[in-house]
Image (tube, rainbow, N blue to C red):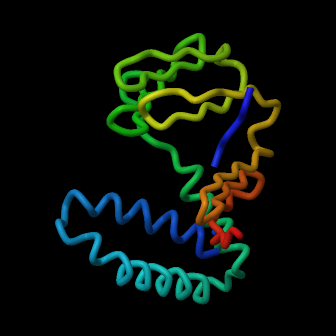
């Protein structure tokens, strides 16, 4: 089975910024125009926070990763909401999703499993021994993104393909 999974101290900040900008979009029509300004403000605030708390770049990166990747979300009636079309059924005997109104079942819920979806369909899944050791890479023609779950970091690199 083919496995395609694809997600930088500024990369983690970019992820936080992206989450903030997504949250702002529905509230402000001109939010897209504010992205460069908000990005600069967020990076300045993060650098000031790190300086005030004597954090190294690595420590700040790890802290941000912890906030982004490990913050608990509220469950509602045994369901976790990923987005408007993707829901995780949390208390089932199998790993289950509801995607665009269709139910998907994976392995038994006592197994660690990775599922790749675009919110409309499941592209595939992989059972793994230890999720905490995962490194997820996403390749596009213009960039490579990564998520490193061993230290809760992530980011992106520009690509200049030949």
Q: Residue at x 47, y 21 (%)?
A: 89
- The percent coordinates of residue 28 (x first, y second) are 19, 66
* Residue 56 coordinates in the image, percent (x, y): 71, 81
- How many badges with numbers are in the image? 0
**In the picture shown, does residue 62 fall above or below 49?**
above
Residue shown at 55% from the left, 59% from the top = 67
Q: Quadrant of residue 80?
A: top left
On the picture, is 148 further left or further right than 79? right
78 on left or right of 101? right
**Which residue extends farthest front?**
162
Q: Examine the image and state in which quarter residue 59 appears.
A: bottom right
Picture residue at 51% right of the left edge, 17% below the top: 104
Q: Nearer the viewer, residue 79 or 161?
A: 161
* Relative image position of residue 30 (x, y in whole percent): 20, 71
Which image quadrant is residue 153 in? bottom right
Q: Nearer the viewer, residue 100 or 50?
A: 100
Residue 83 locus on image (x, y percent): 38, 39
* 1 lies above or below 42: above
Q: Residue at image x 32%, y 58%?
A: 23
Quarter of the rendering occupied by the N terminus? top right
Q: Where the C terminus falls, by quadrant? A: bottom right
């Amino acid at each position: 089975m083919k496995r395609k999974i694809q997600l930088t101290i500024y990369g983690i900040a970019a992820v936080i910024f992206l989450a903030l900008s997504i949250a702002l979009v529905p509230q402000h029509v001109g939010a897209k125009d504010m992205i460069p300004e908000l990005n600069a403000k967020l990076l300045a605030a993060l650098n000031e926070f790190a300086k005030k708390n004597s954090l190294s770049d690595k420590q700040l990166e790890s802290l941000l990763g912890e906030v982004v990747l490990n913050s608990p979300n509220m469950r509602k009636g045994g369901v976790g909401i990923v987005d408007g079309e993707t829901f995780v059924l949390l208390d089932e005997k199998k790993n289950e999703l509801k995607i665009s109104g269709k139910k998907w079942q994976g392995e038994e819920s006592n197994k660690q499993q990775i599922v790749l979806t675009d919110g409309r369909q499941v592209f595939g899944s992989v059972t793994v021994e230890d999720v905490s050791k995962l490194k997820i890479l996403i390749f596009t023609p213009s960039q490579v993104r990564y998520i490193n779950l061993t230290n809760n970091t992530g980011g992106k690199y520009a690509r200049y393909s030949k």
